Image: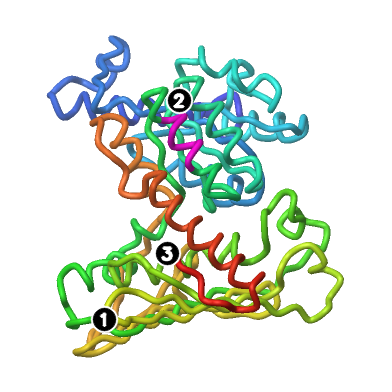
Amino acid sequence: MTSKENRVPRRDFIKKSALGVSALSIGLPLNSAIASGCTSSENKKLGVALVGLGGYSKGQLAPSLLETEHCYLSAIVTGTKEKEKAWAEEYNIPKENIYNYENFDDIASNKDVDIVYVVLPNSMHAEFTIRAAKAGKHVICEKPMAVSVAECEAMIKACNDNNVKLSIGYRLHFDPYHKKIINLSREGTLGTINHVRADFAFTIGDPTQWRLKKSLAGGGALMDVGVYCIQACRYSFGQEPIALRAQAFNSGNEKFKEVNETITWQMEFPDGKISNSTTSYAMSVNSLFVSAQKGKAQLMPAYSYGGLKGFLGNETLDFPKFNQQAAQMDAFALNVKHNTESIVPGEEGLKDMKVIEAIFKSIEQDGARVLI
């Protein structure tokens, strides 16, 4: 059977699959469990509303929500009528679960939505996180958390005031390769870590895209992929930086008239430890290198959605194929279900934004040392 009429709608299939697992675990026949509506808070899939249906939502998040065990795509928010129609057809989203940016606040009364995932241009993160919190919905906000420390603090406050959870879209904390790196400092696998080098850059295309507009992006590559480098240095050392110096380079390409093309920075950590990083929209690099007392570790590529490679000491790292986004969203769904805290809460995004503001301040002061 291949016709649309004979297909089980994806959202119904997902809900029934979760219900079926619950039923089988307690010895009930699948059909009778579905018919009786037998559910529990543990096995109920939480509904996720994607706010912003750009490339990341379309290519990564929505497909991943077909693989998640604890949540599913229940609603969408977009300002484009064409996207409303296409997504409704592909993911069987009912009309009442389709919102735009003007009527978004009506989501408060929608019981199909438990979690709002904000996947908008950076300058819109704070507004929609705060609106989602006031609507009583738990929030995942894509990185960077916002475009200023003040916005991050306002987002955290709004979520706390409305008793909802906030998580930042740091997918790599759930990836097995990066978990290995994160555990280096915790477990002392290679002894004391002395130096970290984290670089992430790519050659950007379309000159009209929002990432090159300061009003929407808040900055160039640093706000986009440089955040991964800040994260990697922080969790590789297992410490917070205390100061930094930064430099910016622009080739004069008209494409970069509003944002920096390339930024390099050096962070100081306690006990004289140093990290070095580069991010850019005009070159290609994707690596993380950790030097330690008893050896070294490296990931290359380090920050991609999949296909990561690396080594730890004399061990070649080789993990099975892994869906970072599915793991990230499932983990947050479990945080909501069990009333536990995300391993990447708003405070984690705030720490990165403090570093970002210090980098821009150092650049403005011709590479001066800036305390964080």
* Residue 120, placed above or below residue 41: below
Which of the two residues, 315 or 86, is positioned nearer the viewer here? 315
Q: Give the residue number, with chain letter if any, for mark 2.
A: 137
- Image quadrant containing the C terminus: bottom left
Q: Secondary structure at mark 1?
A: strand
Q: Which residues are magenta?
A: 153-159
x and y percentages locating residue 289 in the rendered image:
39, 82
Separation of disc 3 and disc 1 at Cα? 16 Å
Specify whether residue 363 is in view. yes
Q: Tell me which label, 2 or 3, sits earlier in the chain.
A: 2
How many residues crowd around disc 2 within 10 Å: few (fewer than 14), some, or many (20 or more)? many
| Overall secondary structure of the magenta section | helix
- Numbered label attached to residue 193: 1
Tag 1: amino acid = Ile
Q: Secondary structure at mark 3?
A: helix
- Numbered label attached to residue 231: 3
Which of the two residues, 114 or 40, is positioned nearer the viewer here? 114
Which of the two residues, 44 or 264, is positioned nearer the viewer here? 264
x and y percentages locating residue 70 in the rendered image:
33, 35
Residue drawn at the location 39% of the way across and 71% of the way down:
233
Residue drawn at the location 44% of the way across and 75% of the way down:
267
